[in-house]
Image (cartoon, rainbow, N blue to C red):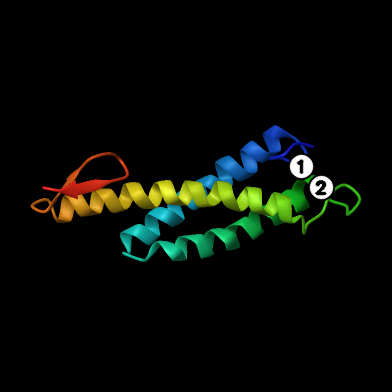
């Protein structure tokens, strides 16, 4: 047991970071492309975090003696990883939108920010 993972690092890496993070990246990108506000990203990632936590429990823990489905600590860890992945996708997509659609007003200053011309 670690601070970030309940069973092993590889279970956490494959399920939370790769699969959950990929889904979070696509969701963050989709929300930015549809011009939704950022607070929706956080709500959707909490729901996705619950699904990822369920998959951890269902695939790797199995019985109540081995681990808890309702572990607040590991749910918050999973949700934090997903929110970070979705935030990165949201900001990169929103930056691209702003500097592409309003190129006479804004210029890209980093992958996550833009500035007035």
Label 1 sits on a secondary structure element that is loop
Label 2 sits on a secondary structure element that is helix
Mark 1 surroundings: few (<14), some (14-19) or many (≥20) residues within 10 A: many
Image location (x, y in percent) of residue 25: 45, 49
Q: Is residue 1 above or below residue 116?
A: above
Of 109 and 58, nearer the camera is: 109
Q: Across the whole image, how many numbered discs are drawn on residues?
A: 2
Instruction: Say which of marks 1 and 2 sits in front.
Output: 1
Q: Residue at x 64, y 58 (%)?
A: 51
Circles 1 and 2, Cβ within 8 Å, touching? The answer is yes
- Which residue lies under the disc numbered 1? 6
Between the residue at mark 1 and the residue at mark 2, the CA separation in whole angstroms equals 9 Å
Which label number is shown at residue 97? none
Q: Is residue 15 left or right of residue 96?
A: right
Image location (x, y in percent) of residue 1: 79, 37
Q: Is residue 60 left or right of residue 88?
A: right
**Whether residue 55 is visible:** no
Mark 2 surroundings: few (<14), some (14-19) or many (≥20) residues within 10 A: some
Image quadrant in which you'd find residue 53: bottom right
Q: Residue at x 56, y 46 (%)?
A: 81
Q: Is residue 33 left or right of residue 81?
A: left
Q: Residue at x 49, y 47 (%)?
A: 84
Q: Residue furthest left?
A: 104
Image quadrant in which you'd find residue 71: bottom right
Image location (x, y in percent) of residue 16: 62, 45
Image location (x, y in percent) of residue 56: 72, 49
Q: Residue at x 64, y 48 (%)?
A: 77
**Whether residue 104 is visible:** yes
Of 109 and 27, nearer the camera is: 109
Q: Residue furthest right?
A: 65
User: Which of marks 2 and 1 precedes in the sequence?
Assistant: 1
- Which residue lies under the disc numbered 2? 61
């Amino acid at each position: 047991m670690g601070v970030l993972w309940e069973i092993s690092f590889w279970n956490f890496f494959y399920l939370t970071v790769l699969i959950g993070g990929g889904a979070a990246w696509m969701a963050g990108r989709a929300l930015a492309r549809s011009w939704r506000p950022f607070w929706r990203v956080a709500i959707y990632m909490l729901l996705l975090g619950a699904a990822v936590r369920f998959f951890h429990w269902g695939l790797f823990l199995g019985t109540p003696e081995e681990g808890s489905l309702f572990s607040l600590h590991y749910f918050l860890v999973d949700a934090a990883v997903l929110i970070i992945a979705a935030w990165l996708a949201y900001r990169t997509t929103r930056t691209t939108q702003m500097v592409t659609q309003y190129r006479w007003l804004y210029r890209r200053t980093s992958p996550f920010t833009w500035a007035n011309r």
